[in-house]
Amino acid sequence: MDPKLKFILIENLSPEWKKFAYGTGINSAVVDYVDLDDRSYQDKLETFLNELVKRNATNFVSMIEKSLKDLGNMRVLNEVNTFFAVRRLKLHYITTYGDFNQQINHLFTNHFDLVTVDEIDYKNSLEKNEWEDFIEKQNGYETITFDEVFAHEKPLILISGVAGIGKTYFLEKCIYRWAEGQVLKNVDFFFYFKIKKLNDFQNISSLNELIKKFYGNILKVSEISNQWSVALIFDGLDKFVHLDKFFSHKLGKYSDMPLINTLEDVLSMKRIKCIFAGRVQAIAKFSRTSKESNKIRNINIMGLSCHGIKFYMETTSLSNTLKNDLNEILSSSIEGKSLLSVPLYLKAVCEAVIKLFLVSVKTFTELQILILYHFIQNTKPEIPLFDKLMQNKNIFLEICKVAFVLIKKKSFYMLQEEIHHINNKHGFETIGLIEISQVNKQYEFTHSILMKLCASIYMYLSVSPHIALQDILLHECIPSVCGLAYSREKVFFSLFRNFEKPGFEKKSWLQDIFEFNDRKLFIRCLYESQTSFNDILNVSMEKINGWYQNHSLAEIMAEKYFIKKTVELQKQMDMKDGYDIKVRLKGILKQIVEAIQNVSRYSNKINDNENILKEVENIQKDILGEKHEDTLATQFLIAMCLYNKKVFSNAENLFREVENRQIEILGDRKEPLIKTKYMIAMCLYNKNQFSNAEYLLREVKNMQEEVFGTKNEDTINTNYWIAICLFDKRQFENAEKIFKEVEGLQNEIFGEKHQKTLKTRYWIAMCLYDKKKFDAAEKSLREVENMQYKYLGEKHEDTLTTKHWIARCLYEKKKIEEAEKLFREVEILRKEVLGETHVDTLNTKRWIGSCVSKK
């Protein structure tokens, strides 16, 4: 029997347990036998319930219900029914949302980027377009795990994100994980409401009425009592047509709408945890109208991580070429990664390339058009896209013109009077690109990314390059204009070309942009055009050479493309007397590498960076040569990727190649060589070659002492690993001696509270343990554990490891009961922190078994 159901019955029926027991219809001898024991009513009822389930496993529930009805105890019967309502609700969620992904836990630990935000972030968000704000945040943010979202006991969680970022998908996964017992374990009922559906139920006047309206057929209970904890999700705040009234009511104004009052009452109930989700501006306004901001946990969904994007692509039928193209955009473009991190856009791109039988996708313009294709096609899927566009040609062009005007005004919203000519003539619902915002009751593009593309289409058809270049606000659209003007012949581009002939020759765009002399803009446009200098009538090498004095970089993939085309141009012109372009390229290569490394840091996953770094290495080999210091530095980072992926043999081989070239070219500069030798030693250690690792580490230590001194952090760390090697070779006396030397220096430099110092003290204790000095080891471990508990926390892995070994000392000292008690404490915490199946948790469990068998 479930402990919760047992608790309900024991809590309410203990004094009259015999009446209840007889009423179930069980053999009276069973009740009489249980009553013979001289124990409390609670104990007797618990024993009876165990017997009831044991003897009537398939129908004990109906027997309990019968007895409660006969006793007339409808209150307890309702509580029992409520318990089973929880089970039905969880089963409903598992059935509804359980087929999304079999790797549900893996998805949440690796595939979504979640960040915390504060009121200042929300204030800034109110003043910007959501996509513009989203791109700005891509340059760096610290993520939190899925479990951290619910780690705080704050009663209100606000979850925000741009359109299509996966808020609903994320929330449905939350519901599924609750149903599986993985999150919010102390919550009895978790209800999920789509706010768009609430728009039709203004007269709902209580929470129970709201629950009954949407979940009555599942729960089958009259009401949920206050004994049950409840959590609520309200998804799609930006779709709430009464949003302005809701915000006004939150600020203290009276509302005569029952639904508004119900929502406000729910927010004030202490026993209820609420989650509101929606687009950034709606959530930002909600946050600003809340009176107790200290009780709110603000979470922003930044979309899929690199792992999540790649995971999704692997589930599609994309060709390897297309996957490689998208991975290239993902790794080399922050804006491209931003777009692909939005699940709705990623899905749109993948589905569109398959429908259009495309073999490659290279540019940001192509991504945008694929997304536009997807949205227009899905508005009325029964009508072919070509027919739909031709039937609504005028409205589409009008929408593109509106987008152009908005870009020029640096605005994102339209009043009714600004678009009434579109709506009255054609009805923009047929295209589906514009909607009304419930936040400010103005019209806006459903997706901001499409507004820029529509403006670019209008510019391509109607605006001269000269006019576009003179208005700096239009510069963001010019690369996409070039993407449209010079694009390869593809089905989806030809759809737009059938509207009307552009007023300007395509060659004039790149020529005018080149003469405008904005290096970064030109490189972006050249890349989007996927053409070469051959499409520019007049190329000034003097101007190109001058650009290398100005190191303002475009996106990485655009810079790489520019380098490739510039080298091709040099070969074509066979420049003997002019500047050597390769020499000029060296001037910006370092910055390109730094930009790539910034993207690598942004991904937060060094394993994802190996391919990026290999591309950098290829560029460096072409321009700088194989033996250049920068090329070697990149090879070192590639080896680090292999090391972090635990491919130690391959990593060692590459580190040794780097070492040989460093010895050849660096001369007396030993710092890079020291790092490389150290990493070779770490590869050897991880391959269990402890003697070879120790030998090399001693060589590294001697070099470090010569260059940095004995009290340098790196020198101390190398000495620490020499001691670890000795320990693994079971040379405990020698290891202990060096650990004590290290501890002395760490105390002096870091202090006794530092994690590194505590770790070394732990290893000194382990030397004592392996020398069978269990009393001394226990004493030392307890001292370490006390400090770890204080400075690292009870649940830190280091603290738990130390506590585990204290229990091992007690076990060796034959203090079995004390050891078992401590092992059980460690097991509980390791289950919580590491999970039930983690090797450390299972190891502790095994030692508990050993204790039990010894008793």
Image (cartoon, rainbow, N blue to C red):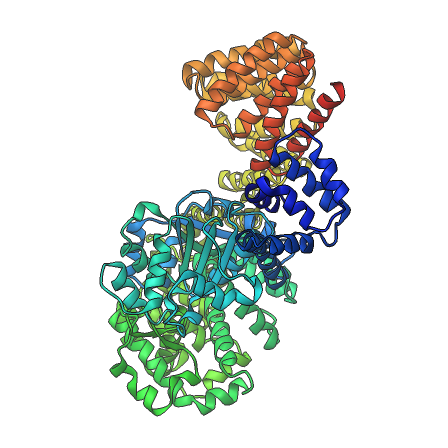
Residue 203 placed where, x, y %?
Answer: 37, 71
**Residue 841, image quadrant:** top right
Q: Nearer the viewer, residue 525 or 386?
A: 386
Residue 647 in sight from this viewpoint: no
Q: Write down the quadrant of residue 29 in the picture.
A: top right
Give the side of residue 549 with respect to residue 376, left or right. Answer: left
Q: Residue at x 67, y 45 (%)?
A: 21
Residue 829 % position (x, y): 57, 32
> Looking at the image, which residue is at 72% across and 46% down?
53
Q: Residue furthest left?
A: 253
Where residue 687 sits in the image (x, y, percent)? Answer: 69, 30
Residue 353 place in picture, x, y as percent: 58, 72
Residue at image position (46%, 13%) is: 745
Residue at (53%, 33%) from the top-left corner? 665
- The quarter of the image holding the N terminus is top right
Residue 422 appearing in the image:
yes
Does 81 sit left or right of 113 as displayed?
right
**172 or 374: nearer the eye?**
172
Q: Quadrant of the C terminus?
A: top right
Q: Report how many numbered discs are placed on residues in the image.
A: 0
244 horizontally vs 158: left or right? left
Q: Is residue 232 above or below residue 769?
A: below
788 vs 5: above or below: above
